[in-house]
Amino acid sequence: MIIWGSGGDVVPLGAVGTQHCATCEAPREFRNVLNYRYAHVWYLFSWVTEKAYFTACTVCGRGVRHESKAFEAQLGRSPIPHYRRFGGLVLLGLIASVVVVGIVAGQRSNVREDALLHDPRVGDVYEVDLQALAPGGFDGHAWGLMRVVAVDGEKVSLEVPNTGYSKASGVYRDLGKARDDSYYSGDVLSYPRQDLVRLHERNDISDVHRQ
Ligand SMILES: [Zn+2]
């Protein structure tokens, strides 16, 4: 579950001495102050959404607002803690690294599948788009499992299953059953080995299972 929210803080930046306050209509102590708001995810990852620098009366809180960039340049630093300013970037970095790990794992898996398709063996089970490999055999678009029954030189023969699924998730459930002869219709289709590699490039063969 993602927990997110927002918060705010006031940072005192030191006294600036006595000035006439137009609201109090009296001489008052004034101080510099920063008001800011932040948004957070899981409290840990946050970023600043709003900030305002004031020179304000210590009694009524009224005063003059400063232009943030110029005021920060004068301060020489931002008074907002680093974790409030850059925590969100840490979260983005974590997300980016998870995505990169996923891409690398996907590429590794593709290399493995290519190797298995270049060297097909009887009993290999392929997750396929049946519309691409067995056009017209199923009612519209369907995902399914096909099994290698023979490899004859460059010619690879695959058994056509009894069942196709409209979603790839149906196929995962069937991986166990696909070891059984009764899973297949008895129809066999043959493909040149190079075609299988091409079908994999187009993701019409999305995975290869070998026991
Ligand atoms: Zn005042």
Image (cartoon, rainbow, N blue to C red):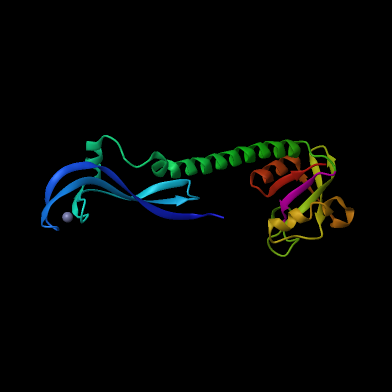
- Estimate the x, y position of residue 210 in percent, counting from the top left: 80, 42
| Magenta span includes 203 | no
Using the image as rendered, state which of residue 102 and residue 19 is in the foreground: 19
Judge from the rendering whether residue 127 lies leftward or rightward of residue 41; answer left or right: right
Q: Residue at x 84, y 54 (%)?
A: 177
Using the image as rendered, state which of residue 73 and residue 60 is in the foreground: 60
**Which segment is the magenta one?**
123-130
Q: Residue extending furthest bottom?
A: 139
- Report which quarter residue 142 is drawn in: bottom right
Residue 175 in view (yes/no): yes
Q: Which quadrant, please, contains the N terminus?
A: bottom right
Q: Residue at x 70, y 56 (%)?
A: 169
Residue 144 in view (yes/no): no
Q: Which quadrant, please, contains the C terminus?
A: top right
From this view, report whether residue 131 is shown above or below residue 47: below
- Estimate the x, y position of residue 44 in percent, counting from the top left: 48, 46
Quadrant assignment for ligand 1:
bottom left
What secondary structure is the magenta-colored segment mainly? strand
Using the image as rendered, state which of residue 19 and residue 53 is in the foreground: 19
Q: Residue at x 85, y 42 (%)?
A: 122
| Magenta span includes 125 | yes
- Estimate the x, y position of residue 187 in percent, counting from the top left: 84, 56
Q: Residue at x 75, y 38 (%)?
A: 116
Judge from the rendering whether residue 62 lies leftward or rightward of residue 148; answer left or right: left
Q: Residue extending furthest right?
A: 181
Q: How many marks?
A: 0
- Estimate the x, y position of residue 77 in percent, counting from the top left: 29, 36
